[in-house]
Image (cartoon, coloured by chain):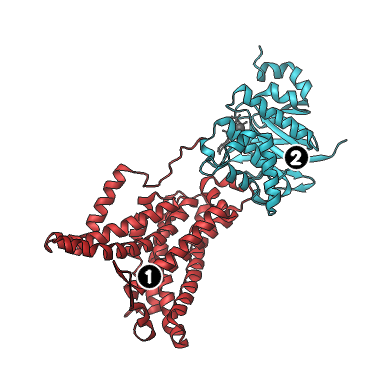
Chain colours: A cyan, B red
Amino acid sequence: MSEVMLEINDLHTYYGQIHALKGLTFTVNKGEIVCLIGGNGAGKTTTLRTISMLKPPKQGYVKYKGQNLNSVAPHEIVTKGLAHVPEGRRIFPRLTVKENLELGAYTVKDRNLITKRMQQGFEIFPRLRERQSQLGGTLSGGEQQMLAFARALMIDPELILLDEPSMGLSPLFVETIFDSVVALNKAGKTILLVEQNALMALGISNRGYVLQTGEIVLQGTGEDLKNNEAVRKKYLGED
Amino acid sequence: MSAELFFGLLAPTIVDGLSIGLMYAVIALGYTMVYGVLEFINFAHSEIFMVGAVIGVELLTAVLIPTGLHPVFQLIIAIVVAAGAAGILAVAVERFAYRPLRVRNAPKLVPLISAIGMSLLLIDVMRLILNPANPNRPFPSGGSFDFFTQTINLGFVSINYKTMTVFVVVMLMLAGLVYLVNYTNLGRGIRAVAQDQSTSSLMGINVSNIIVITFFIGGALGGVAGVLYALKYGVASPVMGFIPGLKAFTAAVLGGIGSIPGAVVGGIILGLLETFAGTYLPLMTNDQIGTEYKDIVAFGLLIVILIFKPAGLLGKAVAEKV
Ligand SMILES: Nc1ncnc2c1ncn2[C@@H]1O[C@H](COP(=O)(O)OP(=O)(O)OP(=O)(O)O)[C@@H](O)[C@H]1O
Ligand SMILES: [Mg+2]
């Protein structure tokens, strides 16, 4: 049995009266790519926001490397090696690419380390090197996704939460992003991936969970889910 | 009016307008920086400015003059203490009057009322402290403080030491602020929080801390401006914040609220406009229109500028992709 990196147990999250997560339980093991698939409004984004405590749960807990995160502030969670690339990229539009990356390393004090990691990011996404003094808001959607990803890597995270990295991107960009997810996983990073692009996501994932209105309705290996009839019908657009 | 008179007054008017404008700029920075992180106008800022001025003047009068130190050193000490005290006061106001509303997700108008309330409270408390019958506190003059009435002649214009002091202190503060905001980790944090709070926290930024620091910086700048204002106009009083506060707020809007360079540009433009109007209106109209109408002219022009640039001169220019 491999080492559990992230343990989610009986998670309930509310937006006012809206019960968005209804008793979610799942785990992510060290070294895995796990994906969370589901339709619009299923609660995928809420799950990630609860894990990083931007939206703390009403009930249940999130444990990361054995530590309960429920009462830890979002800005402290980052320092534990958990990075969250939010939905819609959320790069800082009026800061340059370089400044965005430096902000990713806000908690890193060692200048040399920051420079080194920035160079690593530029090697993964050479486009960002060319654009480094450009304002984030002037990048294309795909470039912004690369930036959001590279920014998250600035803390050299152990676990990365990725919220719909393929959203609104051309197939070529989607492939670039998915390739880098696989490469980072090979390099030892654990990844929790949220996607609507279920086929591609399941293709690179060790395991997957299917979320529907705040509940997990199916789980299995990436391969199993890809071949599951219900999943194919519902999420892969087959009738 | 003769061309000779016109050009003769030009240089002193520019110098005076710049020095006033720079003070507006420094006060405007307090409004704009807080607006940047919270989208909220801290109307109590003009009273933070006033408290800074009173503390500076009182400290000079009661404590520093008896030490017999050189007046420049005395002024430096007064400025530093006023900056610290005003900064702490701004943080306290945030802590007790704004934060409780923010954490309860109060609608945006509510903290505005709270700010106006704090503003009135600070005026009245200060009046009580100073003595309601005679709350004005003159800036020290005479004796060693005659130093500040000296002038230096630059050939085309002569500048007195008070005005010189305003220039030097404001320039140092602006340089420090530009460095802090643009080239330090803290400054990047402030700019990040101004753009996106939840994503900032995902970067490891403690958003509440940044808000507190922003109030401190804004308050400290206001406090220093207060001392400079008292130096230039010779008096500190509980109600002194109202007019310069209003003008600095206007300057911040003119420059583009939330924009740091905008606050500086807006302050300088407003200072120059009103000083020019004050000097030249009476001359050009044979005293039919006196100096007291300078604000009408200045604000009239401002409205015209804002009609053409509604977001302010340096308001957010980059389209934001979401
Ligand atoms: N800020 C909010 N306030 C109120 N309700 C919200 C908020 N954010 C999300 N919800 C609700 O919570 C539920 C789950 O939303 P969530 O964003 O987690 O879905 P999602 O699976 O990420 O969807 P999508 O694929 O469209 O991004 C939805 O019903 C949504 O309307
Ligand atoms: Mg979502």
> Are labels 2 and 1 on one chain?
no
> Which of B217 and B282 lies nearest the eye of the viewer?
B282
Looking at the picture, which amino acid does disc 2 mark? Asn
Q: Is residue A119 left or right of residue B47?
A: right
Q: Is residue A74 left or right of residue B34?
A: right
Measuring 39% from the left and 76% from the top, which residue is drawn there? B128
> Which quadrant of the render holds ligand 1?
top right
Circle 2 chain: A
- Assign the C terminus of chain A to one quadrant of the image: top right
Query: To which residue does mark 2 refer?
Result: A9
* Label placed on residue B14: none
Looking at the picture, which amino acid does disc 1 mark? Met
Some atom of ligand 1 lies within 8 Å of the CB belonging to the residue at label 1: no
Measuring 80% from the left and 36% from the top, which residue is drawn there? A31
As drawn, which residue projects farthest toward the right? A1
SS at circle 1 = helix
- Alpha carbon distance from label 2 to label 1: 66 Å
Query: Relative to B172, is B200 above or below?
Result: above
Q: Quadrant of residue B234?
A: bottom left
Location of residue A59 in the rendering, given as x and y in whole percent from the top left corner: 69, 43
SS at circle 2 = strand
> Which of B86 and B122 lies nearest the eye of the viewer?
B86
Circle 1 chain: B
Query: Dot 2, how many residues are within 10 Å of its Cα: few (below 14), some (14-19), or many (20+)?
Result: some
Query: Relative to A133, is A221 above or below?
Result: above
| Front disc: 2 or 1 | 1
Location of residue A201 in the rendering, given as x and y in whole percent from the top left corner: 70, 26
Location of residue B178 in the rendering, given as x and y in whole percent from the top left corner: 49, 56
Query: To which residue does mark 1 refer?
Result: B164
